[in-house]
Image (cartoon, rainbow, N blue to C red):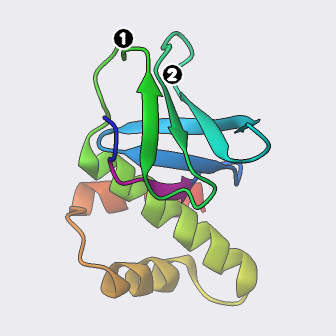
């Protein structure tokens, strides 16, 4: 797990999450005067943790084992799309939600299928 790439995404509440492979981690705090950032798995009963540098791009160290299966890439992609749409909806209040979703899908090459889109307007 060491030296894996971290992709930072936002949670439903606007907090930063570290996405490494198929697992998501929430930020716990910094140690050694900000030299290392500590992240813990988002599942409550899981003890897996990772440590990254202040730039949040590479896993420096990991500890613990996951006690569950990872998320599907499609689920992570839906979460990123949903949060991007929410952020854009807050910025431009007069734009229709469907137009925001379409423009976000056109900005990225995605594997989201039609049945996944049905859940997005309700979440905006």
Observer-nearest of 112 and 44: 44
Quadrant containing the C terminus is bottom right
Rendered residue at 27%/51% (across/down): 74
Question: Secondary structure under badge 1?
Answer: loop
Is the residue under label 2 in contact with that under label 1 (CB below 8 Å)?
yes
Magenta-colored span: 4-9
Task: Judge the density around disc 2: few (<14), some (14-19), many (≥20) Cα neighbours within 10 Å.
Answer: some
Expressed as whole percent of the image width and height from the top left, the position of residue 2 reads 34, 38
Residue 102 visible in this rendered orientation of the protein: yes
Is 47 located above or below residue 112 in the figure?
A: above
Q: Quadrant of residue 122?
A: bottom right
Residue under pointer 1: 67
Quadrant containing the N terminus is top left
Indicate yes or no whether the magenta region holds residue 116: no
Question: Secondary structure under badge 2?
Answer: loop
Is 14 located above or below residue 28 in the figure?
A: below
Expressed as whole percent of the image width and height from the top left, the position of residue 66 reads 36, 17
Residue under pointer 2: 43
Expressed as whole percent of the image width and height from the top left, the position of residue 76 reads 37, 50
Observer-nearest of 59 and 87: 59
Task: Judge the density around disc 1: few (<14), some (14-19), many (≥20) Cα neighbours within 10 Å.
Answer: few
Rendered residue at 36%/11% (across/down): 67
């Amino acid at each position: 797990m060491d030296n894996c790439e971290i992709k930072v995404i936002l949670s439903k509440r606007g907090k930063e999450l570290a996405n490494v492979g198929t697992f998501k981690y929430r930020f716990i705090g910094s140690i050694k005067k900000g030299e290392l950032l500590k992240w813990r798995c988002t599942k409550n009963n899981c003890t897996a943790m990772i440590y990254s540098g202040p730039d949040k791009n590479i896993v420096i160290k990991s500890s613990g084992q996951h006690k569950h299966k990872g998320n599907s890439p499609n689920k992570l992609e839906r979460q990123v799309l949903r949060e991007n749409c929410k952020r854009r909806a807050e910025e431009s209040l007069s734009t229709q939600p469907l137009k925001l979703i379409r423009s976000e899908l056109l900005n990225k090459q995605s594997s989201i299928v039609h049945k996944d889109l049905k859940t997005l307007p309700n979440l905006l």
